[in-house]
Image (cartoon, grey):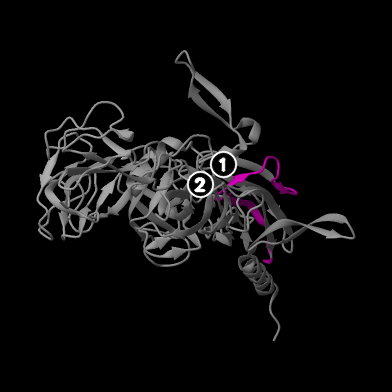
Amino acid sequence: MFLKRPQYLTLLVLVFLSATAWAKPKVELTMTSEKEVVEKNNGVETVKRVPATDIESGQVLIYTMKYSNTGDEAATNVVVDNPIPKETVYELDSAKGAGSEIKFSINGGKNYKQPSLLTYEIKGPDGKPVRKKASPEQYTHVRWIIATVPPGGSGELSYRVRVK
Amino acid sequence: MKKQSNRPSGLLKKATGVAAGFILLATLLPGTAAATTAANAVITNTATVNYDDTGGNPQTALTASVDVTVNLVTAHPTLSAPVDATTSSGVFLNYTYTIINNSNGPDTYNLTSAAVLGANVTSQTAVFRDPSDSIDITGVTIGATSVAVAALAGATVITVPNDGVSDASVNGIAAGDAVFIAGTVDVVASVVDNATGTSTITLTTGLAANASVGDQIGGLTTFILKTTPIATVNGSTYDITITANDGATAGAAPIDVTTTTVLVISLTVTKYVANVTAAVVGGTPFPAVGTLNTGLGAGGIVYYATGVTGNPGEVLEYVIVISNGAGAATASDIVISDPIPNFTSLTSNIALDPGTTVWSDVAITPDNGDFAESDGTSVFIYAGDGTAAGEGVDNVGAPGTGGRLAAGATTIGAFQVTITP
């Protein structure tokens, strides 16, 4: 049995629409923690990263998040939010993420801005408000914004903190 | 206390009670607690990703998380410096130390001592004892943690990281423990584990100052250094250096040096006599200036150490002077036994002067509880200065068991005999 032309076209449209409806982005995210150790071989010291399940006060932790889109549609407006652990302090300029826009919050994640725009207000000696630039110790959250992650696409985000 | 290291300058006055020690310690210590994360705390980091599909439709958010446990970072403790003290030869002396944990978790400090004996100190023993002086110890284990949530001055509830063990303590700190927090000493009323990865320490007294996140909470305890010297010369000294070391912290462990002065008993007994019937001048008079009135005779008598003679039937009066040297150790259980001389018989009561120039007339009846007595062949004087319990009646030595003479104290006894006619 052969379909008539209008029926054939209808079927094609349905197949296309179904395929479109089934396509979805699927973002996956993993997080690891590492620390740096100094190894000495033949008198030469080298710094090596090792997985960190434990850490000492004052040492630096490196958090790395790997994301990937295992779906069959691009993920858009991908936003990764990471509260900085309260036991740690963000290390200046340590946040990385190729192809992402990085912003920070100093108010518990209510607002995110680039470091140069992160300011807060205090009362000056004359009683008038004085605007101050936030220091890394005041950062509470890190945010990465990735416009698009295509199907099969992946990337890596990272930052460093020092344990109080 | 002579020298010390790894702690602020100043003296911690010796306190007999732990509480007193805490109060004094609070005046000694600066805000030494550094910001630190407690050992055994778990740092949890959770990231959340939100995203849309190409049509701008939000997709289900997902998270990823990783935990890291904080290790113990050891630190040398803060060790107090008791004031140098004095004891008598053969008598123990307790130095009470206070020690504070400066690590970010429980730490054990081994205690060691080394003595340097001065001249005339024959030997000494030194042991460490628990705060109640019940058992010997070789070290102390003290808890510590840090503040997880900032607290204002006056607060009694302090939130700290959980140590991963579900019990009524956190990092070795439990109810009843003393802790150093926000620049002062407080006592823990209770410790409760929370469901949020934290524990709550409730203090008996509110914080003296604000506490910030990461401020160290150091456990505090006391221990005793018990030392017993043997010396031959009054005023001899010896040094004991103690060290508190966890064996894991780099750098010099804190030490304290105590200098102990040893008192030695310096008793002298001198006997003088006077011919009461017919005064005879001899050598070395007593008293050196003036006369004495013991109340046994007419008074106004001078006694001599040598050269006194007497005829049969004449009355002799003896005085026995018992003295402890200035600055000497207190002598206890002093019993003077003086045989009645040959060819004489005891013909008076016994007069006693504990150094007050007020004489007591004591009957010679034996074993009747008096401070002097005679069994017919000897005179017994229980010399004392009236400072010990049971010495108050005649203000002299304890009957039967002997009296006590402090440094510089003197007791004089006197009795009369008649030369056999």
> What residue would you read off at disc 1?
B4
Q: Position of residue B18 (x, y in %)?
A: 35, 49
Image marks 1 and 2: residues in contact by CB distance under 8 Å? yes
Earlier residue among tags 1 and 2: 1
B155 or B382: nearer the eye? B382
Vertical relation: A123 (above or below) B224 = above
Q: What amino acid is at disc 1? A: Gln
The residue nearer to you, when weighing B409 against A57, is B409
Q: How many marks?
A: 2
Compared to residue B30, the image places residue B377 above or below, namely below
State which region is magenta. A70-99
Q: Any magenta on residue B351?
A: no
A68 vs B356, nearest the viewer: B356
Residue B68, horizontal then vertical, whole percent: 59, 60
Q: Position of residue B58 (x, y in %)?
A: 55, 56
Q: CA distance from mark 1 to mark 2?
A: 9 Å
- Chain at tag 1: B
Q: Residues within 10 Å of mark 1 (few under 14, many from 20)?
A: many
